[in-house]
Image (spheres, grey):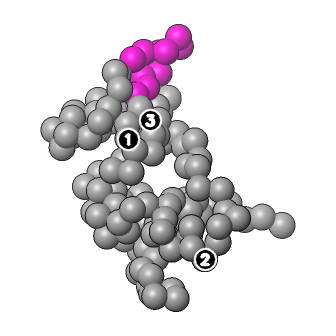
Amino acid sequence: MFSDKLKIMLYVEDVDVSSKFWQAFGFEEISREEVDGTVVVEISSGKNSGTIFVLYDIAFIQENSPEVALNSPSIMFQSDNIEELYKNMLNQNVKVGDLIELPGGNLVFNFADLDENYYAVTSEK
């Protein structure tokens, strides 16, 4: 059986820089280890989060696992204060889309990380 814990692998150009990017928005580095000569970092939005991002060096994956799909997953975050998060990302020069209101009242925007992977954020109801 599957558990309610989920790890999502993100393939990035620079694991350290990517970890710092996510930490700027409240993520925590929960583990760091060397695997076959490369650094692998796990980050999450909190110690009790059911979802963990695993940051892998994309060059390492291309060399050691060329069969792995390198396209990024489509991820939508939820935020309990989307307007503050949006302003914080703008202040840190993150590439963000417009903050829009969806039918039903939810707010949503998208943003890109340093590797040009795009993510969405929606407000919690």
Task: Find the magenta span and give its range.
Answer: 100-109
Identify the residue position indicated by label 1 in the image. 112
First in sequence: mark 1 vs mark 2: 2
For residue 50, say whether it is visible: no
Residue 6 appears at what percent x and percent y? 62, 61
In the displayed structure, would residue 100 be above or below residue 49?
above
Give the residue drawn at x 43%, y 60%. 12
CA distance separating discs 1 and 2: 26 Å
Identify the residue position indicated by label 2 in the image. 64
Identify the residue position indicated by label 3 in the image. 121
Determine the image quadrant of residue 100: top left
Q: Nearer the viewer, residue 125 or 113?
A: 113
Residue 49 appears at what percent x and percent y? 50, 61
Residue 106 magenta: yes
For residue 110, say whether it is visible: yes
Determine the image quadrant of residue 24: bottom left
CA distance separating discs 3 and 1: 11 Å
First in sequence: mark 3 vs mark 1: 1
Q: Nearer the viewer, residue 58 or 107?
A: 58
What amino acid is at disc 2?
A: Asn
Give the residue drawn at x 34%, y 56%. 22
First in sequence: mark 3 vs mark 2: 2
Number of the label disc, if any, that sits on residue 9? none
What amino acid is at disc 3?
A: Val
